[in-house]
Amino acid sequence: MKYLRLSTILAALFLMSAGALFGNTINVTTTIQAAINSSSPNDTVAIPAGTFNEAVVVNKQITLLGVGPTTIITPPSGNGITVTANNVNITSLKVTGATDNGIYAHNVSNLRISSVTADHNGNSAVGSGIYVDGITGTSSLNSITATNNQVHGISIGDGSNGVTVNGGTFTGNGVSANAQTGGGINVHSVSGAISSISVIGTVNSSSNYNAGIILFAEPSGSISGVSIGSSGTITLSTNGSGSIGEGVAIAGNVSTVSITAQFTEGSLTNGAGVAVVGTDNAGANSPSGVTINGSTFSGYGLSTPAITLASSSSSPQYISTNPVTATGNTIGADGFQTEDLVYHKLDNASLGLVTTNATNLYVTTNSGSIQRGINAATTQTVNVGTGTYTESVTLSKAITLAGVDTSAKINGSLSITSDNATVSNLVVYGSAGDGITSSGKSGLTLTGVVSRDNSGSGAVLTNCSTVAITNGSYSWNTVQGINATGGSSYTLSGVTASGNGNATPQGSGINLKNISGTSSATNCTANNNHFHGISVGDGASGVTISGGTFTGNGTSGDARTGAGINIVAQNTTTTSNVTVSGTISSSNNTTAGIYIFADSATVNAINTVSIGATGSLTLSNNGSNGVSYNGGAGVVLYGKITGVSIGNTAFSKGSAPGGGLLNLGDGTVGGSPSGTTVSNSSFSGYTSATPAVSLTDGHGHTSPNDVTATNNTFTFPVAIKVFLQGPYSGGSMSTALLTGGYIPITQPYNTAAFGNYNGGESVGSVPANVVDWVLIELRLTSNGAAVSRAAAFLKSDGTVVDLTGSSARLFTETVSSGYTISNFIIVRHRNHLAVMSATATTLPNDASAYDFTVSANQAFGASSMAALSGGAFGMYAGDATEDGFVTTDDFSPWLVANTAGASGYAVTDFNLNGFVTTDDFALWLVNNGLGASSLVP
């Protein structure tokens, strides 16, 4: 208050000084009107403190000067002050209690009113604190205090031009229930044009019945060029009463309005910060060129929006169809919260668009429609907030449709009908047909999109080009996950497509059909799909599958289903130039890890397929009993296929009945794979019934063309039956060492006599029925170096088993050429003479073990086998020195051990009963007399 009084005094002194320069000072002694009447132009009429019960008319170019709010004019009727002359100054006084207006001016120019208080005027229900119309020139209303006036604080009417409201306080105006009353500052055009109105300085317009500032042009009038807050601070708070109220209300034929202000909502149940409305429910006379910038909005909500383009959000009336630019404001914490505080085109398609961000639009569940967001956009990104939107959406523009994350969901479908459209981080689900569709479009991007649980496919792209699908999931759809047919240049990266096709026989995770150009699927995951994980074919060319996981595909028993990766040509098509590379795992699929299938050799062909040229592929446990190709395989080739190269691939059988590589012909029409090569790959666990590589499957699918196999490693079971002479009795061998707990849990052949074998075989406990450890060796030639060695267990019935005691021992061998393995088999024991098979044996031989026990001729050199009871044969006992001979050198260690009463796991225990006794000497004595020796070269 101190500062207000000081400014008032300074203004008065200035004007008095100016009066001295430009005119005389007329002091009011009786009435103000008498002083005015006696004055001359440019005079100052000085009014002292006091109350003047009179209506004043200023009809001369004078200054009316009071001493502040203690100079009070209370007219008995009509207006407090009526101005009819140009160039009038009114300052430092108070007008109150006027029946009509506190101050009224009509058709004058250069009017200046400053430091005036207009309070409780308009008792006839038509009056405002200050009302001017037809005001021209350079007019200003400075530091006005207008409170509790019946209609408005300040009202500027028809024909006004160049009026500035600079500073002031406007509170509690509009005390009637008339919805059109109650503006702190009101600009109202009925039939004449109003232009160039400015509200600047420190203005507080609060708690008015309708609005802090009203701009209202009726159809026959117009308002243009209004600037609110270009300087200073405009505060508009708690305006309105009941169900109406705005900080700024703009209605009708209004154009070019700029607003910078601080808005506070207050306690309204249905108001707004800025309301921009037309004059009917079709948008007639909608305001245009409205700009809001640098403003703050506090306390607004859904029913009391910060900015609205209709009179009510619950039942929109008096709508505006023109856009509003509202960038650079503080409305909500982020774009989504801001959207919920703006009522416009995204809430009601009939309204104009309020742009709060130059490059982004925001859709929330409160606005309720993604489609309205797309329709409203030109180049902006349409951001979709958390929640479910039940609608079918058409993306018809080259814009980005972006979910805030995958909590933004479309319960319906998404159709992309524009080139160069982008969709990111959205969920599409529950469509009665396909989730996402596009036909004939180019430059499409889908990033982080989820399309699931649709009655059709997750995404159907037909004849599209330059399509990028990155990350995201296309899973649990009735048909395909992604079905791309025709077009060119598809790039998929990090996509998951799992659980698709649950109600259709053709439901794959990813289907790339009849596409050209350069396409790729990189590091994708396709698991548990009804048909295939990923399928490339029917005219496709130039496709690379690089990296990825493909597991458990093919849930039906159809022989053609269930490939992790499927490459196909059918329906008179040719598929060519397909590459499978990188780090790939394709396992536990019904038919094959990789299935290459040319349906009819007369018309179809698959040409040039590269598998594993780079990276490493793992194909494990593929195949099922329901598959007609011998239970399936890691890779199945069937039909007219040319130029398949396989490298750097790990084939592993697991428990599935499938083989490794099946290279099969179509016996009905004669088409067979040709030019198939496999190199630098490994095959583990395959058997004679399910071979690592096969050109026939026993069902009429046979290829006359060979497979070129070089530098591959095969891990296969070797079945052996052999007896040890020492523990043998009556058709089996004693397990006394096991019973006595003497057999070590770690293999014992890491000594010089056995070439310091360094295998890591070890068990927690020795399996049942085990006699002892043996060392098995494989050779390509009878006198060649070992190509594979392994320690194993020998059971009492003579079978050699793995460390579990239940299966034939596996051996690993690298074969430089071919895929048929023939080896000499050598069995070594720590105190029996080693034996070798008489001939090289085709391996794996799990279906028919190599049996040393049936004939001496089974061993290389018949005399290297000891004859046993019952017509059996076994390995000679008594080699205590482990040098391959039974001699007196072996007697000496026996004698020492026998004398000491040795027991346990002793090399001189020739009968393997856990004790060194004369029974062991008897075995040695016989074999020494025979001059027994190992004949293994």
Image (spheres, rainbow, N blue to C red):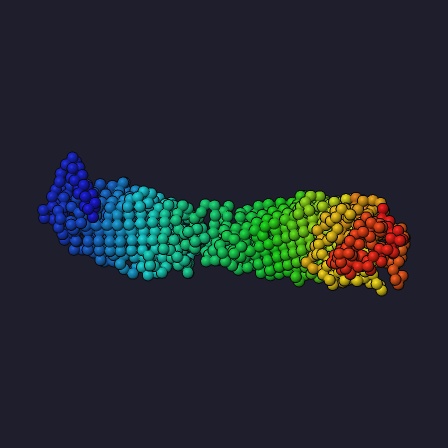
Answer above or below: position of 520 versus 854.
above
Say whether residue 424 is visible: yes
- Nearer to me, 679 or 116: 679
Identify the residue at horizontal 65%, vertical 52% (top origin): 549
Q: In this view, does 803 lie to the left or right of 418?
A: right
Q: Is residue 266 left or right of residue 871?
A: left
Say whether residue 533 is visible: no
Q: In this view, does 741 lie to the left or right of 851?
A: left
Image-quadrant location for residue 738: bottom right
Identify the residue at horizontal 67%, vertical 49% (top origin): 584
Q: Residue furthest bottom?
A: 730
Identify the residue at horizontal 34%, vertical 55% (top origin): 265
- Nearer to me, 107 or 427: 427
> Exactly how many numbered labels are in the figure?
0
Identify the residue at horizontal 47%, vertical 54% (top origin): 346
Q: Where is residue 561 in the image (x, y as percent from the top left)?
A: 72, 58
Q: Position of residue 711 (x, y in %)?
A: 77, 44
Q: Residue furthest top?
A: 21
Q: Position of residue 717 (x, y in %)?
A: 78, 55
Q: Position of residue 124 (x, y in %)?
A: 23, 58
- Nearer to me, 837 or 28: 837
- Nearer to me, 269 or 102: 269
